[in-house]
Every structure is written in structure tokens, then in C-alpha cells.
Image (tube, rainbow, N blue to C red):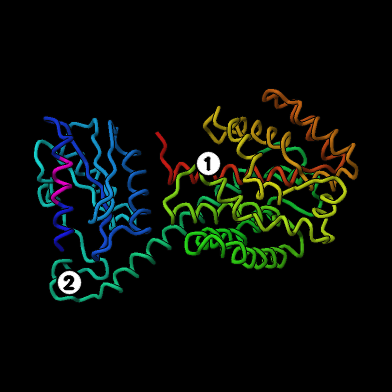
Amino acid sequence: MNDILAAREREIQNLQKVMKEDNIYLTLKANVPGEVKRTDISAFLIKLARQRIYQTFHVKSEEFFDDFDGFYYIFEIEEKSRLEVKLQAVAIEEKDAVGRYIDIDVFQNETKSLSRSDLNIKSRKCFICDENPYICIRNQTHSLEEIKNKIYNDVIDFLENKATKIISESIFLELNLDPKFGMVTAKSQGSHSDMNYELMKRSIGIITPYLALMAISGFCNPLEEIPAIIKDIGIKAENMMLKGTGNINTYKGLIFSLGYTASAFGYLLKNNLAFFQLYDVVAALGEHLHRELESGGETFGLQAYRQYGFLGARGEIIKGLPTVQEAIKVFEEYQEFSDRALTMTLIRIISLSEDTVLLKRAGSLERYEYFKQKVSSIERYDKNQINQITNECIKENISFGGSSDLLAVLIFITKMKKEFFYEK
């Protein structure tokens, strides 16, 4: 207890050191019980709240502290209305189920923070029940373990819901892009006579919960255990997809690529890692895939590896999504999910990737290179040229399924970065 009190005194001293007359400051910390407050859950909650602070306020500076009483930030912001800032801080705290587990205090000219009662705002309730939390603490109504479990479960539910939403949005953005070089869109079956838009929509509804579960698996498990867990989830997702589509393979490749990426994000968030480490985590998760390539299996992907040295989707994971890393630079020139941005990004993906779907449909390496070069030659967003090449792809039964999977992965990465990883 003495250590905690000393840490809180140091927090006040740190605030005093940075305070200037009339400027407004925020402190951010996790609102979690127990003497051990420097946990991975606390770090995640603070990362999430920091993101929201940058989305809400004009931050002039920040300082991060790691003390016995937990992790915390001190922000100096440009806003001048203390009351308005407090209202916005409360809105962040009340935004969703995990907002209750963060504390954002507002200071100006003194180390006494502006309270909710100063604005006639109702005080926060107990995490478990609707009672005043101080009454629950005094009466020891809830055990520490019960409260910790509640926080953990709320964090997991929040992540699962957020991942589900972003995964679905990402796949639909890819699906709805039109024209798209022989792939299924809302307007065309492309070169896929056995597929249509409604079938793809149904498939997305089937596989999305499994992909979200892979993200949670990355959050909940050690790195070395994740590959086996997500492989099992992926097999279940494939089986349910095939059952729901009458045995038509709509998204098997995407389950693989996006599954690894989603689980890597889960691992990043649990372990308080930076966004730039995502690709290293993907590669670490895919390290075992080398053995699959050498296994001598008879899938088309493994045949392409033996005959042409194509690493395909496995290679993207093994190497940490190199095609996505390059193509995302094209998308960042636009910073919007427009047809123009997504098409030019897809073209870059096609030019860089080893697309075994294209190879299978092309039937020869010569035709593979012809169509890959045909699409890659598009240097600007010319709808007429894109339509012409798309029509040729459809006529020749060509599709770039592996590349479209990577586009969905790229969109997912972009959306997750915006949601969880603020970068100055």
C-alpha cells in the first residue's frame, strides 16, 4: 500500500512538472482493481483509450510513465474549455463496455482534477452491479477474482465484436469492387460460373465469426500455441463454408491469409506491441509452413511450389506479407476506400504476388505471365482500360483469387491500424 501511495504522489509531482498556466492536461490510466496494475489487460485498455484521446483532442504533447500504481499518460492538449474537455473525456469513458475500465482526469492550473459531480454528471456504477462502487468496496460485495474476470471477459467480447465488424467490412469492400479482372463482384460473376454475389455474401456471414475467433485466439494464447489453434479453427471454417455453399470453395484462401493476420493482431494487442511489429508476428506464426511446402502433398499450391517454386499464400505468411507491405504504400497515396484507390492497390498486388489461383486458371506459366503483365501494365485509373482487360479475363476464364484475398487482408490491416494503433 505504501508503494501505491508513493507512486500516486510521484504522479502528482510529474503533473506539476509539466503544467503551465491555463493549459489543459489529461491523465490516462486503467481503472482496474488490485495491487498489481501493470498487466497486459491494463496496457491494452490504455492503448485503446490513447487512440480515442488522439481522435477526440488536439494533443500537443504526451509523456508515458510506468510506476508501481500502473501505466499512465499525461497529455497536454490545445483545447481551452475545461468543462467541454471533461464532457468529452466522460464520453470516451462511457463509449462502450470497456470504457468503464479507463480513467481520464482533466486538470488546469491545479492538481485537483475536475470531477463528474462538478458537471452534475452521475458517478460511475460498480463493474458488476448497479450499486455505488464505494458501497461494494466497503462491503466487499464482489471478490477481486470476480471483478478481474468481468474485466477480462468484457475485453474479449469487445475485441470479438470489433474484429467481427472490421473483418466483415474488409471482405465486403473487396467483394464490392467492380470491375475486377474476372473476380466476382456485386455486378458480375466474373469468370466464376459457379459463384455469384449472393453466394459470396452468404459465405462471408459463415466465415466471419471464425476469423474473429482467430483474432481472439491470438489475444489469449502464447505465440507458439497459436498456429495449431487457428489451423483447427480454419478447418472448421472451411467445412462450414463448403456446407453452406454446396461444396463451392468461395473463400478458403482468405480464411488462411486473413486468419493468420487476424491472430497476429490479437497477439499484438495482448502484448502491447507496436503496429510495425505486425509483419514479424505474422512471419513467426507462419514459420512452420516451410514444412508444409516440403511435405509432398498434392494440393495445387504444393504442386506449383514443386514445379515452379511458387510459394503462394504460404509464402506471403512465411515472409510476413511482403506483397501487402509494398501495396499498402499505393493505398496510402489515396487514404480512402474508393474504387480508384482499391483498384490501383489491387493492380500493385497482382504485379507482386505469386497467385496460384491465376496459375491454375491460366493453365501454363506463359499465360500466367501474360495476364499478370496485362493487368500490371495499367498505370492510372482508366475505367475503360480496366473494363477491357476484365472482359478479356472473363472470356479466357481468368481470375486473380489469391490477389483479391490479399486486398481484403490489406483493407483489414488498414482498418485495424486506424482503430487501435495511433502513430504520430
Secondary element under disc 1, as helix, strand or loop, is helix
The residue under the point 16% across, 41% down is 15
* Residue 277, x across and y down, in percent: 51, 45
* Residue 393, x across and y down, in percent: 82, 38
Q: Quadrant of the N terminus?
A: bottom left
Task: Report if residue 202 is visible in the image.
Answer: yes
Q: Nearer the viewer, residue 298 or 203?
A: 298
Task: Report if residue 97 is visible in the image.
Answer: no
Residue to which mark 2 is pinned: 136
Q: Does residue 151 appear to the left or right of 361 in the view shown?
A: left
Q: Amino acid at mark 2?
A: Cys
Q: Is residue 201 above or below residue 128?
A: above
Q: Amino acid at mark 1?
A: Thr
Secondary element under disc 2, as helix, strand or loop, is helix
Magenta span covers which residues? 9-15
Residue to which mark 1 is pinned: 414
Crowd band around label 2 with a 10 angstrom C-alpha radius: few (<14), some (14–19), many (20+):
some
Which label number is shown at residue 398? none
Q: Quadrant of the C terminus?
A: top left
Q: Is residue 240 above or below residue 44?
A: below
The prevailing secondary structure element of the residues shown in magenta is: helix
Quarter where residue 396 is shown: top right
Q: Nearer the viewer, residue 282 or 77?
A: 282
Indicate yes or no whether the magenta region holds residue 201: no
